[in-house]
Image (cartoon, rainbow, N blue to C red):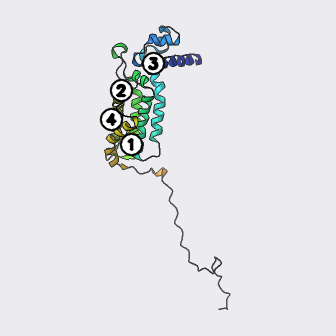
Amino acid sequence: MADRADRRSELLDAADRVVRRDGPRASMNTIAAEAGITKPILYRHFGDKNGLYRALAERHTAGLLASVRAALALPLERRDRVEAVIDTYLAAIEARPQVYRFLTHPDPAADGLTPAGPLAPALRRIADELTRSMREEVDLGPDSAVVAEAWGQAMTGMVLAAGDWWLETRPFPRERMVQTLADLLWGRLAAAGQRPVPAAHAPEPTEPTEPTEPTEPDGSGTAPADPPPGRP
């Protein structure tokens, strides 16, 4: 079993090399040749190109999801955290543009896939992470839970489409793109209230202390003792 898993990993390494070089034009024939095997053996491991897409998507999105969760957990002001999450996504697609194009722009006629199909499970999980964060921290009014879910889906779709355009056209640097998208999202988020800290995380109340009688100093830092009975 371990040998099969190792072999599958080696084949994915070969597929990675071809995809980074050829992008969406990467073919099963080319990947098989890169791995030094025949195409039927490649099919034996992944079924078809759809299976290979899914395996590559899982490999490349695991780290992205972890990075998004880490950005959402940063102890930053809300606006800075919005920028951190957007930057995490844009940095990931900028670092591996050909892999991104392979996963988001397959040829439906050749592969039977829809655009962003292989990336769809990761995008759903990113939307879920955004939804969870807003539900826990942002007060969006009486329908806060469902509004947070709608926003999580909308933000994910917006950043996906805008990131796709930015990667192809590169009209300005990533930092400017992050600020541009954050500006668009920020209006309503800035106006929303902050949810209170759950009771489990609130500081424990302290017991009030009894007031003490004031004493007058005698120069030694202690109050003078009462005089013995019978003495003035």
Judging by the rendered image, the residue that carries numbered circle 2 is 168
- The three-letter code of the residue at mark 2 reads Glu
Q: Earlier in the sequence, mark 2 or mark 4?
A: 4
Few, some or many residues within 10 Å of mark 3 (<14, 14–19, 20+) = few
Of the pair 12 and 142, the residue shown nearer to us: 12
Which is more foreground, mark 2 or mark 1? 2
As measured in the structure, the alpha-carbon distance from the residue carrying label 3 to the one carrying label 2 is 16 Å
As measured in the structure, the alpha-carbon distance from the residue carrying label 2 to the one carrying label 1 is 31 Å
Judging by the rendered image, the residue that carries numbered circle 3 is 21
Q: Secondary structure at mark 2?
A: helix
Which is more foreground, mark 3 or mark 1? 3
The image shows residue 140 at horizontal and vertical percentages of 33, 46
- Marks 2 and 1: CB-CB under 8 Å? no
Q: Earlier in the sequence, mark 2 or mark 1?
A: 1
Judging by the rendered image, the residue that carries numbered circle 1 is 134
The image shows residue 124 at horizontal and vertical percentages of 39, 31
Picture quarter containing residue 128?
top left
As measured in the structure, the alpha-carbon distance from the residue carrying label 3 to the one carrying label 4 is 32 Å
